[in-house]
Amino acid sequence: NEPVAGAIGIPFPNGGLTDEDGEVVGPTVLHGIAEVGTGILEGSTPLKRGPFPLEKHCDGISYPRPHICTGDSTAPVMTAATQALKDRYRGSNVIYGGAGNKILAAALGEVTVALQHKVGGPWDLCAPTAVLLGFGGKITDFFGEEISMYQSEGTGFGRSNERGWIATPPNM
């Protein structure tokens, strides 16, 4: 009922099909085993993401750090949760697409916290959660409970998509 290992493919690790020299680059495949470690698949393009890749887009005023990562949902629970985190950390909200991309942003330390109020199902969380845990990060549901990929009998709670998730990088 919990993720053990996973891999995340990043199709355009440099943001496009070529590097700074105009050479074609391939994808990056990052893998992780929960609470063991992470790595990059041999032959992958080196990962150029890391702490705050948005730096070139942020002047420190428009999007002050720390960054809180969400999607573009306007659901009341997300509006309230995002505002609470902005109040707590005095940072700004940055929009990342995809559950896996948000969790990877937390794993790599690009953001202070990533959250989403619902997801499609275990296929959205298993691989990135294993990578996050491999880095030493943490993920819980909105209520601080461990993520349950599937409903446990007798709990009354549905899959993880009904309780949202919050991911934090290592050392948070």
Image: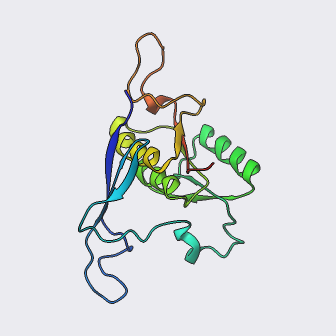
Q: Which color scheme is applied?
A: rainbow
Expressed as whole percent of the image width and height from the top left, the position of residue 168 reads 57, 47
Which residue sits furthest top? 154
Residue placed at 58% from the left, 57% from the top?
111
Rendered position, 157 above or below 85: above
Is any part of residue 90 visible from this angle? Answer: yes
Expressed as whole percent of the image width and height from the top left, the position of residue 86 reads 71, 52
* Image quarter of residue 142: top right
Q: Nearer the viewer, residue 83 or 73?
A: 83
Which residue sits furthest bottom? 21
Residue placed at 37% from the left, 42% from the top?
124
Q: Is residue 93 left or right of residue 99?
A: right
Q: Is residue 56 left or right of residue 49?
A: right
Q: Nearer the viewer, residue 50 or 33?
A: 33
Q: Is residue 74 left or right of residue 101?
A: right
Q: Is residue 99 left or right of residue 10?
A: right
Expressed as whole percent of the image width and height from the top left, the position of residue 23 reads 27, 85
Expressed as whole percent of the image width and height from the top left, the position of residue 166 reads 55, 41
* Image quarter of residue 65: bottom right
Q: Which quadrant of the figure contains the N terminus?
A: top left
Rendered position, 39 above or below 142: below
Rendered position, 104 above or below 49: above
Is any part of residue 165 visible from this angle? Answer: no
Task: Tally the numbered discs.
Answer: 0
